Image (cartoon, grey):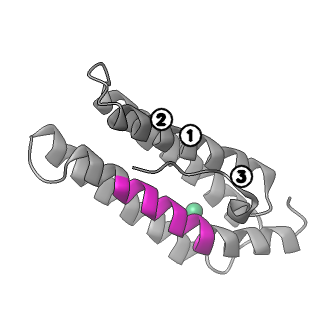
Amino acid sequence: MSMIAWSNQFSVGVQEVDQQHQVLIGIVNQLSAALDMQDRDLDSHKVINELVQYTVYHFGTEERLMREISYAGIDRHVHEHQAFVKQVGQMVTQLDHGQGPSLLELLLFLRDWLISHILNSDRDMGDALNLAGIR
Ligand SMILES: [Fe+2]
């Protein structure tokens, strides 16, 4: 699976959010590299848990920033976060029981969701934060 290279197109214009997005992309890339190398020592459960935990923490940051500026799109944005956490939780449970998606499928879902969410919803949020003077 190809890695995600951070570039300015992913910037939402808010330093704290950009830094956290870089960490998230880093974890996805780390998992992707381990899968590509068929690393037998890869504790995928541990890395995915780390990813989920960091994602929940990161969503908390975004939601705090959105509340700070009474962002009009907050409900829709929070709903996207919640739906994502729920879906990943279900996929991880299935994976743990040897059912459902493969690790690669889970990773592809994470990667594609993350990219599309950053480029659309997070950018809109970033524009609003910038207008309110948060960078
Ligand atoms: Fe978000």
Residue name at image x 32 percent, y 53 percent: 88
Range shown magenta: 108-121
Q: Is residue 91 above or below residue 69?
A: above
Q: Is residue 54 above or below residue 124?
A: above
Q: Which residue is mark 2?
A: 30
Q: Which residue is mark 3?
A: 18
Residue name at image x 15 percent, y 48 percent: 94
* CB contact under 8 Å: marks 2 and 1: yes
Residue flagged by tag 2: what amino acid is it? Gln
Q: Residues within 10 Å of mark 3 (few under 14, many from 20)?
A: many
- Confirm whether residue 89 shows in the render: no
Tell which residue pokes out farthest to the top in this image: 41
Q: Residues within 10 Å of mark 1 (few under 14, many from 20)?
A: some
Residue name at image x 27 percent, y 54 percent: 105
How many marks do you count on the picture? 3
Q: Splitting the image into 4 quarters, where does residue 9 fall?
A: bottom right
Residue flagged by tag 1: what amino acid is it? Gly
Residue flagged by tag 3: what amino acid is it? Asp
N-term-proximal mark, 1 vs 3 = 3
* In front: label 1 or label 3: 1
Residue name at image x 87 percent, y 74 percent: 131
Alpha-carbon distance for marks 3 and 2?
Answer: 18 Å
The disc label shown at residue 26, or none: 1
Give percent across and percent down for residue 18: 71, 52
Q: Splitting the image into 4 quarters, where does residue 121 fall?
A: bottom right
* CB contact under 8 Å: marks 3 and 2: no
Between 131 and 39, which is closer to the camera in this rendering?
39
Quarter holding ligand 1:
bottom right
